[in-house]
Amino acid sequence: MSDSEDEETPQLSAQALAALQEFYAEQNLQMAPGEAYQHNSGVIEENWQLSQFWYNQDTALRLAQEAATAAGEGGRIACVSAPSVYQKLRALHREAVSVSIFEYDRRFAVYGEEFIFYDYNNPLDLPENIAAHSFDIVVADPPYLSEECLRKTSETIKYLTRGKILLCTGAVMEEQATRLLGVKMCKFIPEHTRNLANEFRCYVNYDAGLDHGV
């Protein structure tokens, strides 16, 4: 492998490497971190026990494109509990934008320094290198349809964003979302790979393309 290839290989931080090794040890898998990154990039499967429900490909693509457009060239995007959007962004916009995934699921440690362990119960327990208002847009999908979960996740969103917010949650959370984040419901309706009992909607606090061409 050439030096240039070495430079392009994602490097795991000590924290992410430890989390990754712990995960693979639990799964009895013998795989080096570099191989894990290579084989799992974009193909981590949803885990219902962690209240994960992936968007279908069309929705993930639409939300990723919206986030990239809103962030602008060279912009920074934070995906908070929105792993399927994060994976689509990585696939589409590796050079155009910078993307971070804030996620409780430590499998995402395979993404190296882009992974930030996140527990919504501790909304501001973030690494010191994550500065306030350092992301051009935050894409968030709180794992539970509850006022408590949305309220705590909102603390994280408001800390991270420079202004723009793209929230995906249940239609039943509209009043709370507007009150907590000042967002409004979009015309675009997100869809998941599996049918969910609750209707989901997207909410934004800026003039989004999700209200056009629906």
Image: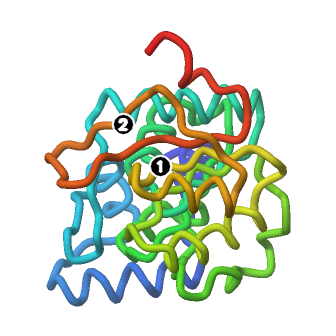
Q: Please give the name of the residue rendered at 36% of the width and 37% of the height, measured from the top-left corner.
A: 190
Q: Please give the name of the residue rendered at 75% of the width and 29% of the height, measured from the top-left corner.
A: 72
Residue 184 as seen in the image, left or right of residue 81: right
| Residue lying farthest to the front in this orientation | 175
Q: Where is residue 102 in the image (x, y as percent from the top left)?
A: 55, 66
Residue 157 as seen in the image, left or right of residue 54: right
Q: Please give the name of the residue rendered at 47% of the width and 58% of the height, measured from the top-left corner.
A: 173
- Where the C terminus falls, by quadrant? top left
Q: Name the residue under label 2.
A: 190
Q: 69 or 94, which lies in front?
A: 69
Q: How crowded is mark 1: few (under 14 residues within 10 Å), some or many (20 or more)?
A: many
Q: Mark 1 points at which residue?
A: 168
Q: Please give the name of the residue rendered at 35% of the width and 46% of the height, measured from the top-left corner.
A: 200
Q: 125 or 178, which lies in front?
A: 178
* Vertical placement of residue 88 versus 209, above or below: below
Say which quarter of the image contains residue 118: bottom right
Residue 194 as seen in the image, left or right of residue 33: left
Which amino acid, mark 1?
Answer: Cys
Disc on the earlier residue, 2 or 1: 1
Look at the numbered discs 2 and 1 and tell me whether their residues touch, using CB distance below 8 Å: yes
